[in-house]
Amino acid sequence: MSATSRLVLIALVAGAAGWAGLAAGERGITVAALVDLAGMQIASWQGSEAAGPPARDMPFGPVIYFRHPDGLPEWSGAPKKTADGRDFLPVLASEDVSFDPERIAAAPESEQTILYYRNPMGLPDTSPVPKQDSMGMDYIPVYAGEANDDGTVRVSPGKLQRTGVRSALAIEAAMEMVVRAPGVVTLDERRVSVIALRADAFITSVEDVTTGAAIKAGDPLAMLYSPEVATAIAQFITDQRSNGTPSPGSRQRLQNLGLPDSVIDAIATDGRPPVNIALTAPRDGVVLERMAVEGMMSEAGQTLFRIADTSVVWVMADVPETTLTGLRRGAEVKMSFRGLPGEVFEAVISEIYPEVDMQTRTARVRIDLPNPEGRLLANMYAEVELNTGDGAMVVQVPESAVIDTGDRQVVIRDRGQGRFAPQDVVLGQRGEGMVEIRSGIAAGDRIVTTATFLIDAESNLNAALAALATPEAGQ
């Protein structure tokens, strides 16, 4: 070939390249495709047999946006450069995310069977023939293999990252939950004593005992004179002098009037009736109330003192009824108190009360807590953490994987190769970001944990369109 012919050929190739570049910009054809076309054209001009481009899955369509060349989460609607001067890479329409069922790229549309046409706006309207909506938009063809009556959605692997679809395996493990509930310190009702007389008496004096004072068992509280008690003592001494030993009947009468055995023994030893009788504390504790006043006349049964032993206190926690299923006696509990910052107390559940409050819809849980130093005071506020769960192995998935509409609970199953399908499930307990699945899936099933609403919406649309199109396609 002469030099002139070569120059003419180069000029023709340059012109063709310019025209192809313009067309490629309008149609979104990539640089690699242009190189293949140019190679085929030159080969045909030289008379050699065109081998054709290598078989590969080439992207097609117009440029939708531009992405970062390193795959970072940065995109642009116009050409852009990175900080180090590199160009952002164009993303064509076929590479962008779409929840439309994937078509077979290698087969031309003419070789695929069109089942029906669906509304381009996603409305539940289909047609067996080409059609336009009220705005002049063409209905979208649905090809054989794309229609699934089970709502299956197909997403190419290259589109998953852009959508943010992530999946995880359903696991089988013990469901353990931590329930946080408010609590209040109360006195142990088994350790509260009321001091009252069994006979009418006059209070001759009261010891230096006030409300809030700590006392020991046997400490004197007041001195009193009771005519009925004095008569019983006189009879006891008379019987002892007459018989040489106290009469069991007279001794029993003194015990019935509330005199301690130590006082009765002292009277028997001394042999003289005392004028006043000492009223003593029955247990260690703190004085909650003092009603005794010097000089007052106390009737039988009238309360003079209330004493409580605070070495052990109760913490009453109000637990929501929705979390009662996993609670059990003996479960571990952790508590903290605003009045004792930085300290954590550990105990176990002693009792779960068998009723739910009608107003708050909570049940009361009692925790017995040792209080040897008396730092925990009645009515102190407590923050209680209760461990629930019976240790049984259950199937569970992350809470983000569950779509709960109120009357329907669904998870999205990852069937592999970009195929996803909704699955109805029955939920159980929840805790620590996980939810129990009682039926619907098994341990080891792969479940979508993010972008579930997008896939579920598309699958519902596909199923609805397929159901509407079935009778029309057969006409």
Image (tube, helix red, strand yellow):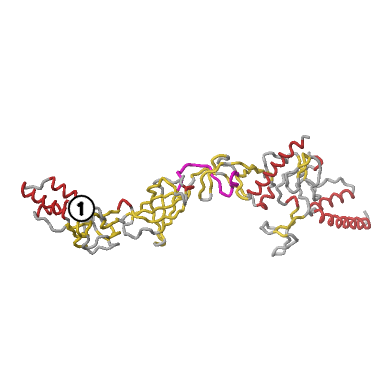
Residue 159 on image: x %, y % = 69, 50
Residue at position x 79%, y 47% in the image: 133
Is 320 in the magenta?
Answer: no
Residue 104: image quadrant is top right
Residue at position x 20%, y 54% in the image: 200
Classify residue 205 as left or right of residue 313.
left
From the viewer's side, name the closer residue of 257 and 134: 257
Residue 305: image quadrant is bottom left
For badge 1, the amino acid type reads Ala
Classify residue 68 as left or right of residue 207.
right
- Mark 1 sits on what residue? 199
Instruction: Write the start and end of the magenta stretch as one range.
Output: 388-410
Residue 457 on image: x %, y % = 66, 47
Residue at position x 77%, y 45% in the image: 140
From the viewer's side, name the closer residue of 328 and 88: 328
- Residue extending farthest to the top is 474
Classify residue 309 as left or right of residue 434.
left
- Does residue 33 lie above or below 76 as drawn? above
Residue 449 on image: x %, y % = 60, 48
